């Protein structure tokens, strides 16, 4: 099956995503459809996100870059801590 390269999204690490888009773990968990404990354990290094989650982060990164008002709804002055 042939893939269209226009739709390829490269995975993005949690650290890179939060560096570009600092937000509360609660908000990120809601965007990803996971529990806050999952985001907390990823950010402190106890667990690693699944590849699908990393791809979802890359997609969110692109959406936020394309739509700054959407990004501003989630960016908070309180930064997430990332190990």
Image (cartoon, rainbow, N blue to C red):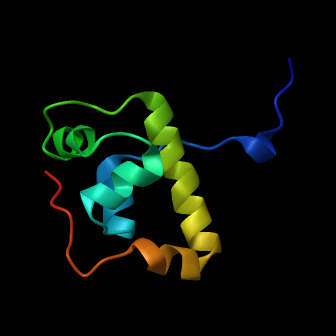
**Is residue 81 rendered to the left or right of residue 35?**
left
**Residue at (78, 40) in percent of width and height:** 5
Q: Position of residue 72 (x, y in %)?
A: 46, 80
**Residue at (25, 38) in percent of width and height:** 38
**Is residue 59 rendered to the left or right of residue 15?**
right
Q: Nearer the viewer, residue 42 or 27?
A: 27
**Residue at (35, 60) in percent of width and height:** 27
Q: Nearer the viewer, residue 68 or 26?
A: 26
Outermost residue toward the top in this view: 1
Instruction: Give the answer, above or below, for where 53 lies relative to 50.
Output: below
Q: Nearer the viewer, residue 69 or 50?
A: 69
Q: Position of residue 18 (x, y in %)?
A: 32, 61
Residue 28 sits in which quadrant?
Answer: bottom left
State the count of labels. 0
Instruction: Give the answer, above or below, for where 67 lies relative to 8.
Output: below
Q: Name the image quarter holding the N terminus.
A: top right
**Is residue 28 rendered to the left or right of residue 43?**
right
Residue 39 sits in which quadrant?
Answer: top left
Q: Nearer the viewer, residue 31 or 22?
A: 31
**Residue at (55, 75) in percent of width and height:** 70
Q: Position of residue 2 (x, y in %)?
A: 86, 24
């Amino acid at each position: 099956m042939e893939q269209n390269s226009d739709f390829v999204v490269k995975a993005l690490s949690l650290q890179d995503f939060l560096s570009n888009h600092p937000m509360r773990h609660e908000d990120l968990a809601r965007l990803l459809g996971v529990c806050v404990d999952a985001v907390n354990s990823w950010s402190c290094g106890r667990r690693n996100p699944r590849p699908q989650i990393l791809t979802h982060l890359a997609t969110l990164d692109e959406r936020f870059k394309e739509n700054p008002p959407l990004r501003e709804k989630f960016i908070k002055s309180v930064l997430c801590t990332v190990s």
